[in-house]
Amino acid sequence: MGVAFVVLALAGGGAWRARQEARQARARLTDVRREVDAASARLGALEARSRGTTRPLPAAEAPPSRIVADVASVLPGDARLERLSIDYERGGTLEMQVVARDAASWDRLLDRLGRASWLRDLEPGPEAREAEVRSLVRARWAGGEP
């Protein structure tokens, strides 16, 4: 009878431990499901962004390298950027010191800047159209697809 009691006590203790472990496993499973759902949501947002279906990248989030690359992409071969400043506090305001070989190059540059979808509020500065054209151009980088 003593042996039966010991066996019964051990079985009861084992059942109690198994129940505790099952409760802990369910709690952990709930936590893991929550983490998986959050990771899936992040993955979906990243995939949508990579397909270009999200909002354009705002100037405040744009790295300088992105803005410089955008400006460089519209420069004609006979124009160069001598200086570029980016004012993030003023909504991505750009000041570009540009030099064009001649008036035709300057006009091409202004045309390309004017057609750039990522640029707003283009303000060319004063220019002298003899020989090489040097001027300051102000604009605002309005963002684009990342």
Image: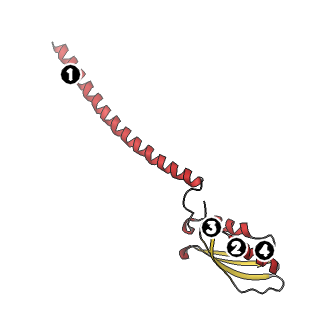
**Amino acid type, callout 4:** Ala
Label 2 belongs to which residue? 113
Drawn side of residue 63 relative to residue 34, left or right: right
Q: Amino acid at mark 3?
A: Pro
Mark 2 to mark 1: distance in Å? 84 Å
Quick one: which residue is furthest to the top in this view? 1
Is residue 81 among the parts visible in the rendering?
no
Q: Earlier in the sequence, mark 1 or mark 4?
A: 1
Tag 3–tag 2 contact (CB < 8 Å): no
Q: Earlier in the sequence, mark 2 or mark 1?
A: 1
Question: Which quadrant is the C terminus positioned in?
Answer: bottom right
Residue at mark 3: 64
Front residue (pair 17, 108): 108
SS at mark 1 in the image: helix
128 in relation to 115, above or below: below
Q: Which mark is residue 9?
A: 1
CA gap, disc 1 to disc 3?
Answer: 71 Å
